[in-house]
Amino acid sequence: MPARRGPVPPPRPRRVRSRAVLGSLAVVLGASAAACGSEMVTSVGGCGIQPGSVCHGTYMYRGHLAFANLYGADLTRADLRRAVLASAVLTGARLRHTDLRDADLRHAHLEDADLGGADLRGARLDDAWLHGATFTGARGVSAGALERGIVCRTVLTVGVVLNDDC
């Protein structure tokens, strides 16, 4: 038999699958699946999207928040430019000095929401529920724009209340 030339390659390591390793992997995967249950909170810009959230100054530019439940949330000074908030629940929310330029608020629930000083230039408010909402000092808001929504005791500016007799 002729002599071999060159170095001899090392033997290939054998794959050993331990039952303990597979069991540990199953436990980790099971825990991950449990964490993804219905209790998980969606986050936009680092802000948890749930009732009562406090998200001062959060950057949510172009955030997709259609149908989100932000009941009583504090979104003061948040950046919600071009955000989709169609049919979102923002009842009792604080949106003071919030940037809502070009936001889609169609069919949103803004009952008793405080939008004082907010920037709503180009925002769509068609069929939004505006009962008791306050827009004092807001930019880009007019009586005509608000009347595309459902107004009832809606405060446009100090001393100007739309549909006060509803």
Image: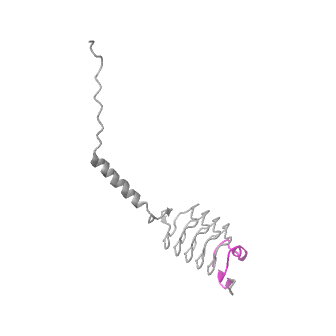
x, y percentage for residue 87?
Answer: 61, 69
Kindly give the residue lying farthest to the top in the view shown. 2
Q: Quadrant of the C terminus?
A: bottom right
Up-down: is 26 above or below 47?
above
| Residue occupying the point 33% across, 55% down | 27
Up-down: is 157 above or below 62?
below
Up-down: is 94 above or below 6?
below
Kindly give the residue lying farthest to the bottom in the view shown. 165
| Residue occupying the point 60% across, 64% down | 84
Instruction: Give left or right: position of 2 versus 119.
Output: left
Start-end of magenta stretch: 136-161
Q: Nearer the viewer, residue 64 or 24?
A: 24
Q: Nearer the viewer, residue 13 or 101?
A: 13
- Magenta segment: does it hold 164? no
Q: Nearer the viewer, residue 51 or 93?
A: 51
x, y percentage for residue 38?
Answer: 45, 64
Q: Which of the colour schemes (rainbow, by chain, secondary structure, one colour) is used?
A: one colour
Kindly give the residue lying farthest to the front in the view shown. 19
- Magenta segment: does it hold 154? yes
Give the image quarter of residue 80: bottom right
Kindly give the residue lying farthest to the right in the view shown. 144
Q: Nearer the viewer, residue 115 or 43?
A: 43
Up-down: is 7 above or below 116?
above
Q: Quadrant of the N terminus?
A: top left
Name the dominant secondary structure of the magenta segment.
Answer: loop
Task: Count the marks.
Answer: 0
Give the image quarter of residue 125: bottom right
x, y percentage for residue 100?
Answer: 61, 67
Instruction: Give left or right: position of 108 versus 46.
Output: right
x, y percentage for residue 34?
Answer: 39, 60
